[in-house]
Amino acid sequence: MGRDSSMVMSAAQMARMSHLLEQALALDEAGRKRWLEALAQDQRDLEPALRRALLSQNRSGIEALATLPKIAAAAGEEKVESRLRPAMMVGPYRLIRQLGAGGMAEVWLAQRADGAYKRNLALKLPTALDLRADIAKRFARERDILAGLEHPNIARFYDAGISQEDLPYLAMEYVQGEPITQWCDTHLVEVRDRIKLFLQVLDAVQYAHARKVLHRDIKPSNILVTGSGQVRLLDFGVAKLLADEETQTQLTQLYGQAFTPEYASPELIRGDRVQQASDIYSLGVVLYELLSGTRPYRLKAKTPLVALERAVAQTQVPRPSSQITLEGAMARATTVKKLLRQLRGDLDAIALKALQRDPADRYSSAEALADELQRHLSKEPIQARLAHPLYLLSRFVLRHRSSITATAVVVALLAAVLGFALTRAA
């Protein structure tokens, strides 16, 4: 059979393959060939992938592992039950309950069992299916990235290690909060305060970019807001080091394009190399949703990647102000008419610039996007709009409304007095 590196396995198939590999990895090459020939009929669907994995060991480990099929990530695929349980020990930590699970990792609420401190933390571990030989290397990359990021709006990294069962883990700050969009809607946050909250996100992303780290999976569920209204940016599991293109290419071969399609940039969906502008696009999607209550593209569940790429490439992004609903206005503590006035103009232009298809046409950095939003909050002209004299005048009037109003009253009174005097003189 010819090589089919694009083959995708279901979770159940990957679990069977992991079990079969354990049987054959200890054999020499001749023994592996005999083992493959004797493979049971009900396991023959895995024979091509097993052959590539077992008979490719003369190449480098990364190259051989890159021939393995990827795990199917589509919704509705079979799921293998986690091997982790509450009260289990992982290194010095005791698991309490699962917080979440994805295609490559599980996150558990945990505490130190030795009593060194009683702080709750989030423990990240590979899934039952993610036990390929390079998983420790991948966790080490994430550890190194997290260890270099110390920012009040980025979830803190505490510890990393290998458990008694040779399971790599990362111990991180446990953030009690809600996704930013959900938190804002629950608390009926007005547009202006949503922007202020979003500025915390931009500050965290700019900090990461300054250290040459791209997040690559910016979305509301990775931006939590605490009870005190503080933002925490989470999950740098698929982050990219800008200076490490070669290793990143290897990781892409091994794990595929790991991202959330609804928030991914066109270049990330295409599989092109990405720079800071890719995160700017994802930030633009989040901003669009915070402002209007909808996303730029309304996709059906299980939209194929090809269809998604076509939609992003061909569909004209509507202005946020054109997507307002009564429910969205109520969640922003206002009316449809007032929300329309708030979004039309500056905020429409800012969101659309962040969502330009061509990366060169977006904001050059998270800091540039933050500056633009600050200008809007200060009623100063924004760069995303043409500097038309009437627009510049409108911004001036908004900034100096009180003094202009007082001046207008004085002028009106003087005109009235002058008119009265002229009338008496006549």
Image (spheres, rainbow, N blue to C red):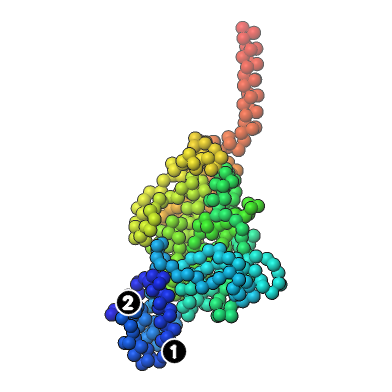
x, y (%) of residue 339?
A: 51, 39
Three-letter amino acid code of the residue under disc 2: Asp
Residue at image mark 2: 45
x, y (%) of residue 94?
A: 62, 71
Relative placement, left or right, of 224 versus 294 is right
- Residue visible at 65% across and 16% down? 417
Front-lying residue, 425 or 143: 143
> Residue 190 is drawn in which quadrant?
top right
Front-lying residue, 221 or 370: 221
The relative height of residue 195 versus residue 130 in the rendered view (above or below) is above
**Distance in Å between CA atoms under marks 1 and 2:** 22 Å
The relative height of residue 149 versus residue 164 in the rendered view (above or below) is above
Q: How crowded is mark 1: few (under 14 residues within 10 Å), some or many (20 or more)?
A: few
Please give the label number shown on residue 26. Answer: 1
- Residue visible at 54% across and 38% down? 334
Front-lying residue, 398 or 177: 177
Relative placement, left or right, of 266 versus 183 is left
| Secondary structure beneath label 2 | helix
- In the picture as drawn, the residue positioned furthest to the right comes out as 116
Relative placement, left or right, of 358 versus 390 is left
- Residue visible at 68% across and 66% down? 119
| Secondary structure beneath label 1 | loop
Quadrant in which the C terminus is drawn:
top right
